[in-house]
Amino acid sequence: MDFEPMLLFALAGFFASFVDGALGMGFGPTSSSILLGSGLSPTSVSTSVNIVKVATGVAAAVSHWRFGNIDRKLVLGLALPGMAGALVGATLLSSLNGVALKPALAALLIVIGLRILFRFARLRAQTPEQSTGQSVPPTTFNRKGLHLAAACGGVTNGMIGAWGPVVTPFLLHRGLSPRYAIGSANTAEVAVASASAVSLIAAVGRGGVQLGVVVAMLVGGVLAAPVAA
């Protein structure tokens, strides 16, 4: 693979990791937007992004576990419907025409991007005390609609790698403190991204995996992690 495309993919991983590390969401939509713009097919984009998300997600999950930011019951409640939704999203993506699907995916990415910006604006408008929040245990927040939100997040993750922008704001809106919302959502994301990647590979074959893209994105993401923090 030529140097310039590799550099573009590394930049995709860098900026995606930077946004995700700073806001707690946005790796999939950011990287998918850049990769789709580079000319890759939607299935290759989603497969590559989800493989990278598995690798980075494991590291994030271990960190959240060490800091006590996750609740196993909540992670399970997110992961199972999220994986089911990921299967649906991956199936839709692999069964539809890639060229015809690109405008729809671009529109979906715009909607997800606006949601991220809206959430970021709300966080900036809050006082430090409000944005930090009290350490509300996961057992006390309103779980109504949890499984549906996780399933919807799984569908968007299977199609464009977008899990956090759907699930994390839902948890925050339901009264869960940020540390538990981000920690539990990031941990469940490992299972959802794995289901998405495996489903897409099974549907389109290993030819849909762009190894060079995955490696370049991982390098860029690792470089961005300390900057984002």
Image (spheres, rainbow, N blue to C red):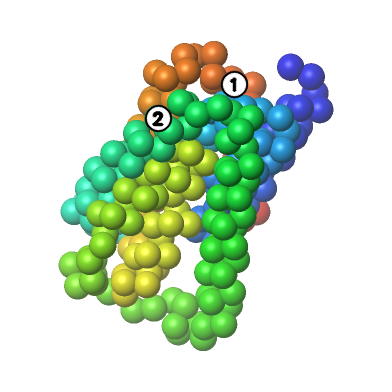
Q: Residue at x 40, y 30 (%)?
A: 91
Pick the front one: 132 or 172: 172
The spot of residue 196 in percent (x, y) is: 40, 33
Left of 126 or right of it: where is 139?
left
Callout 1 amino acid: Gln
Residue linked to disc 2: 91
Q: CA distance from mark 2 to mark 1?
A: 19 Å
Q: Residues within 10 Å of mark 1 (few under 14, many from 20)?
A: some
Q: Residue at x 37, y 44 (%)?
A: 154
User: In the picture shown, does residue 49 fall above or below 18?
Assistant: above
* Quarter of the figure with residue 89: top left
**Callout 1 secondary element:** loop
From where the camera sits, is residue 55 visible? Answer: no
Q: Residue at x 18, y 67 (%)?
A: 139
**Callout 2 secondary element:** helix
Q: Which mark is residue 210?
A: 1
The spot of residue 192 in percent (x, y) is: 36, 40
Left of 41 or right of it: where is 146?
left
| Total numbered labels | 2
Quadrant of the rendering where the C terminus is positioned? bottom right
The spot of residue 115 in percent (x, y) is: 54, 63
Q: Residue at x 81, y 27 (%)?
A: 4
The spot of residue 143 in percent (x, y) is: 22, 66
Q: Which mark is residue 59?
A: none
From where the camera sits, is residue 87 visible? Answer: yes
Quadrant of the rendering where the N terminus is positioned? top right
Tell which tag, 2 or 1, sits nearer the viewer. Answer: 2
Callout 2 amino acid: Thr
